Image: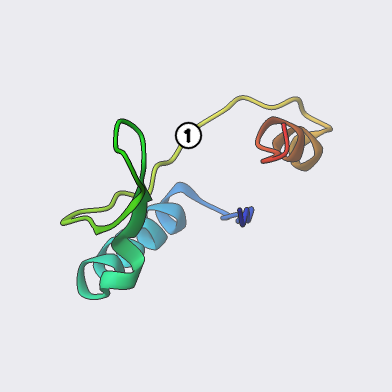
Amino acid sequence: MVSIMLTFDSREHLDGFRCGAAGGDRSHDVLRTGVVWEGLSEPVQVVWREARLPVQEVQLSAGGGARELRERFDPQQ
């Protein structure tokens, strides 16, 4: 699993990034491709009609922002 952390200096820039990402996934099938296995006898590859980039807002302490984010969203946890 690949995990990245992006930072934006304003909500406006974040929203602009999300709109750009949404446009890219509509035109490129590979960005909407996944593997489904739950409830199936074998895994299958699917191309979703729509894929959304989820954004979760969290409150962080004043001094530990990046560290807290890494700990909270560590894919190995």
Residue at the extreme bottom of the image, as rendered: 28
Task: Give the residue at mark 1.
Answer: 56
Residue 25, image quadrant: bottom left
Q: Secondary structure at mark 1?
A: loop
Residue at the extreme left of the image, as rendered: 49
The correct choice, above or below, for 15 with respect to 71 in the image is below
Residue 36, image quadrant: top left
Q: Which residue does the image show at 76% across and 33% down from the upper left?
A: 71
Side (left or right) of 4 relative to 11: right
Q: Quadrant of the C terminus?
A: top right
Q: Amino acid at mark 1?
A: Gln
Q: Which residue does the image show at 65% across and 36% down from the upper left?
A: 73
Residue 61, image quadrant: top right
Q: How many marks?
A: 1
The correct choice, above or below, for 19 with respect to 62 in the image is below
Residue 28 versus residue 55: which sits nearer the camera? 28
Circle 1 Cα neighbour tier, 10 Å, few/some/many (<14 / 14–19 / ≥20): few
Q: Residue 3: x and y, percent?
A: 62, 53
Residue at the extreme front of the image, as rendered: 41
Q: Which residue does the image show at 36% across and 55% down from the upper left?
A: 34
The type of colouring in the image is rainbow
Residue 10 versus residue 19: which sits nearer the camera? 19
Q: Which residue does the image show at 51% across and 51% down from the upper left?
A: 10
Side (left or right) of 24 relative to 10: left
The correct choice, above or below, for 47 with respect to 57 in the image is below
Residue 68 versus residue 51: which sits nearer the camera? 51
Residue 36 versus residue 8: which sits nearer the camera? 36
Side (left or right) of 48 relative to 61: left
Q: Residue 70: x and y, percent?
A: 74, 40
